[in-house]
Amino acid sequence: MQRPLAFGCLITMGLHVTLFAWNNGQSGNTTTTSKAECSDPPYGTHDWIADQAIEMLPDDEKEWLLPHRAIYLIGTEAPDHKLIPTLCGVPHRGWV
């Protein structure tokens, strides 16, 4: 009985560490934490994927989105951080 319990605890601890290892942005600045960063948010994996999606769009759709790129990148971060809608004045709360 103690072995399955110990194994379960180890698995749970391993998952806990893994879940907190993911961040958006470079080391030391992983989150938009001030209003000043709203116009130039930290760039991370979410943002790279979003940029690749923009590259796949037709030019006329890209033309509309590129002037709003900062808010687009904030949108990749906002679901993970509850303060971003307040800090950056995004139009809706998304998944938060």
Image (tube, rainbow, N blue to C red):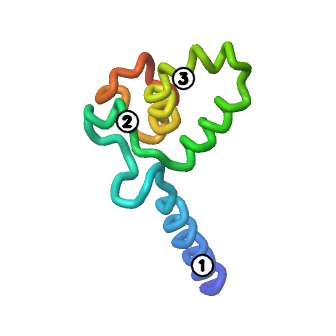
Earlier in the chain: of badge 1 and badge 2, it is 1
Could you tell me if the residues under marks 1 and 2 are in contact, i.e. CB atoms within 8 Å? no
Q: Secondary structure at mark 1?
A: helix
Q: Which residue is mark 2?
A: 40
> Around disc 1, counting alpha carbons within 10 Å, would you say few (fewer than 14), some (14 to 19), or many (20 or more)?
few
Which label was assigned to residue 66? 3
Tag count: 3
Residue 32 vertical placement versus 38 (above, below): below
Q: Residue at x 47, y 54 (%)?
A: 23
Q: CA distance from mark 1 to mark 3?
A: 52 Å
Q: Secondary structure at mark 2?
A: loop
Percent position (x, y) of residue 58? 73, 20
Near-viewer residue (59 or 85): 59
Q: Nearer the viewer, mark 1 or mark 2?
A: 2
> Around disc 2, counting alpha carbons within 10 Å, would you say few (fewer than 14), some (14 to 19), or many (20 or more)?
some
Percent position (x, y) of residue 75? 49, 30
Could you tell me if the residues under marks 1 and 3 are in contact, i.e. CB atoms within 8 Å? no
Q: Amino acid at mark 1?
A: Leu
Q: CA distance from mark 2 to mark 3?
A: 13 Å
Q: Amino acid at mark 3?
A: Leu
Residue 42 vertical placement versus 68 (above, below): below
Earlier in the chain: of badge 2 and badge 3, it is 2
Q: Amino acid at mark 2?
A: Asp
Q: Which residue is mark 1?
A: 5
Q: Residue at x 66, y 16 (%)?
A: 61
Q: Residue at x 51, y 65 (%)?
A: 16
Residue 6 vertical placement versus 85 (above, below): below
Q: Quadrant of residue 71?
A: top left
Earlier in the chain: of badge 1 and badge 3, it is 1
Q: Secondary structure at mark 3?
A: helix
